[in-house]
Structure formats: structure tokens, C-alpha cells
Amino acid sequence: MWLCQVHTPVNIIIDDIAYFGSRCKYREYSIVGLLPLSELYARRDQLLLLLAIGHVILFSFIFWAIAALVEHKVIKGIKRICASLDKITAGDLHARVDVHSSPEFVQLSNGINSTVNALREAIDEAGRRYENELKLAAAIQSSALPHADSLKPYPDGIELYAAMTAAREVGGDFYDFFWIDDKHFAFLIADVSEKGIPAALFMMSAKTWIKSLAKSRLEPAAVFTEANRMLCFDNDTGMFVTVFFGILELDSGKLTCINAGHNPPLLRRAGGNYEFLRIEPDFILGTLPEAEYRQTELTLAAGDRLFLYTDGVTEAINAAEEEFGSKRLLAALKQFGSDVPGKLAKHIHEQLEKFSGGCPQYDDITMLILDYSCGPLVLDAKVEELPKLQNYIEQACARYGIGMNIEDHFQVAAEEVFLNIANYAYENKKGTVSILFSYNPETRSVQLVFTDSGKPYDPQLADAPDLSENVEERRPGGLGVFLIKELIDTMAYQRKADKNILILTKTTGGLE
């Protein structure tokens, strides 16, 4: 048995080769043991490599298994939920989430479906409330609109037509007409800025204030100044209303009017074309409580027509988002031949529908048409003006239901009188002739009054022609007067205030 002292192992490099070695002392000898490091670690490296490869394969398999499980159990479920949510967010509230791949997804699907069902029910309920609000607003709006047929008494010498076609979104358009007294007739058309029940209530307030103040016989300027002040009071909604308002004196045709920021109406003079009534607009109602309003006066003559409308007419749009506009409205009015107000309104509606091409109507379309015929027809004393007189008599006879025989008699008699005035009254100077047609239903008599400022002339003093004489021997003149007397019942003349006044009267009994 022997013993030696072993020294601590060390790394030794011999001839550039690394060794692991150790030595021990045995007696007088030193024993050295060397092992190349490459051989020492070869087995360890192989083992580590095998372990690493095994771990990579194992973890790759585990990762793939987990990914496949997640894809099957989670990702596909999430994708299906997202697809259903896309449909729901696109507006299909009847789409359902139906994922049952795990209890968690079942719970999530049920939660989403319950939420969507609650949302759909809330939307349906809100829609029902909104529909009820629209119906209520429409009822308020409709109840505020008078009917011309129910106007008592119906104003003699006026033909009136008014109508409103409500949009889906109920606005605040309205119109009104009423008596101030037995000689003054008021009318208006208006448009409130907002929609729905608030606009309908504001409309009722504006209508009530204007009507009550006007019936107190205030001047239109005072009516609007006070109505504006009351509408501004406690107007937290910030709404306003545009109004065109007029008071017509039936006998004289004097129209006193105000335009409070509304669309300018159109006026068609008898026998003329439509033109925009250029009245400088005042402030809208409901914004400036200190605003003061100005009124304008003009005179309507027999055969004149006023066409009032709201911006639902001119702001109707087509697919290209173009507005109908004032020019198209003016052209549509000019191309229409009939003088019946209701047919004119229908024609404008047809033009709007043709222009819009099915685009939805976003604003109310309201029109008010007033034909004035009870005042005198004023013409230049020119032969060329005769057709206007004939048209005036034709319309007046149609309005009162007077038969063709009476109309023919009056047409011939009126022509003789008018031509006599045009040719001789002013002696080649400029002058005018006023003609007033009236009908008395109690006596069933028709009256035609001619007034001119020409030289004095009483046709009743003209000598009657001797019809027994030859035409060549008969004195000129007198034949027209003779013809007039044959066609009418009575003829009366007076000279008053330097004017010739000739009155032709005929009863309608037995000839209608």
C-alpha cells in the first residue's frame, strides 16, 4: 500500500492543446495525469445538445398544441363574435352572437345578445315616442291652419287658396287669414326655424299673438313690434319665425304689408307677368326684442294675384343637391296658363316632384294664393288694352256664375264704351280708364262702372241715329250709344271731381 499527495487539478496547454491534468508525489517521484479537454467535455456537450434538441422539440409540440387549442377554442370564437358585432354595428340589430365553444363564450354571447335586445327595444320605444311626437306636432300644425271654405263670410271679390304639404320632419310652416272688420281682410304665411313639437308650439304662439294684435286694429307695424317683443320674452329655445303679413282693404285694393325676413312673394298684375314683390325685409320675429318694424303700402287692382310661399318650395333639392330656386319658381309660374289658384298650386307641386326626382322632402311646402277682383281694373286709355278689359269681364262673370248671354252683352257694351274713351276722351294725350265690375245677388243685377279724367262727355245726350236712312246719308255717331242702350237695361252718367263716370246696369233674370 502506498500513499501519495494529490495536487489540485489544473488546465495545462501543451503544444497548443489544452489538457486537464493533475499530479501527485510518490516518494521521490511525481506522477502526472493528463486528459485533453476536448475529450473531457465531448460527452457533456453531446448530452447538452441532445437535451437542448429534446427541449426544443418538446416545447414546439407544446406550443403547437396550445396554439391549436387557442385557435379552436378562442380565436375562432372571437372571430365569430366580431363578425356578429360587425353586423350589429352596421345596423342589423336582429343579428345574434351564437358561440358555444366554451362556457365563457356562451356567457359572453348571451350577454351581448341581451344587450342588443335591450338596445333594440330602447330604439323601438324611442322610435314610437318620436312617431307619437311627430303625430302630435302634425296635429298641432294642422289644427292651426284655417280652411278657406270655412271662412265666414267669404270675402266677396277675393279668391283664396292655401295649402301645406308637411315633410317627414314636421316643421313650423303655417298660414292664416281672418277678418279685421267687414272691410279689411288679413292674411299671412310663416316659417318657424325648428322642427317637431317645440316648433309647433312656437308656431301656435306666434300665430296667436299676430292674430290677436291685428284684430285689435293696430297698424301692421305696431302688430309686429309688439308680437316680436312677446315672442322674445322667455324664448330659451332660440327659435325664430319669418312672416309675410298683409291687411287688404277690399273696396280700394290698398294692401298694407310687412315682410319679417320671409321669402319675397310674387305679384302678377292683371294681364301681366309674375314679378317678385321687392319689399325691404325687416327683422325675423323672436330674436331682437327692441326691433321696430316698418309697413309698406301698395294698391291691388282687379285681376291682380299674390303668390306667397315658404322656403320649402325654393329649397327643394334634387339628386345633385341643387336647389329648385327662385328662377325655376318664376319660370314655373309663367308657363302655367290656368287662372285657377288650386290648379296653379298643383302645377307647382308637380314641378317640384319632377325636379327632385324622388329625393326626400326635408321641409314643409306651403303656398298661399290670393286673387283680387273686387277692385277696379285700371288701364291705359289705349285700344291695345282692350283684351285686358275683356279678360276682366270674363273672369268676373265666371266668378259670380253669370251666364254667357249676359257676359256677351256686357262684352260688346264695354268694348263700345272703352273704345270711345280711348279714341276721344284724352285727345291724343295719355290717360287712364278705371273699370269696376260688381254683382248684387239680392237684385240679381250686374253693374259696370267706367271712370276717366278726359273731357266731359255724356253719351246719353248723343242723338240716336235714324236707322231708316241710308248708311251713306246717315250722320256719323250715335250708333255705338244706341247699341249700348239695346244691350243693357240702364245707363247713367255723372261728372264728378273732373271725372266722367258712366254706369251700365243689367239684370240677369231670364238670361242666364
Image (tube, rainbow, N blue to C red):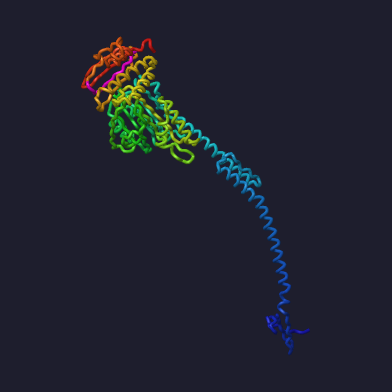
| Residue 323 in which image quadrant | top left
| Residue 420 in which image quadrant | top left
Residue 117 image point, x, y percent: 57, 39
Residue 21 image point, x, y percent: 71, 81
416 or 141: nearer the viewer:
416
Q: Is residue 113 placed above or below 204 in the rendered structure?
A: below
Q: Is residue 241 placed above or below 104 in the rendered structure?
A: above
4 or 188: nearer the viewer:
188
Query: Do we see residue 178 in this rendering?
Result: no
Q: Residue furthest left?
A: 497
Q: Would you say the magenta stretch is mainly helix, strand or loop? A: strand
452 on left or right of 140 = left
Residue range corresponding to the magenta coloring: 444-455
270 or 11: nearer the viewer:
270
Q: Residue furthest bottom?
A: 28
Would residue 283 be counted in the magenta stretch? Answer: no
Q: Residue at (71%, 62%) from the top-left corner?
A: 57
Query: Do we see residue 80 in this rendering?
Result: yes
477 on left or right of 62 = left
Residue 62 image point, x, y percent: 69, 58
Viewport quadrant of the N terminus: bottom right
220 on left or right of 23 = left
Would residue 451 be counted in the magenta stretch? Answer: yes
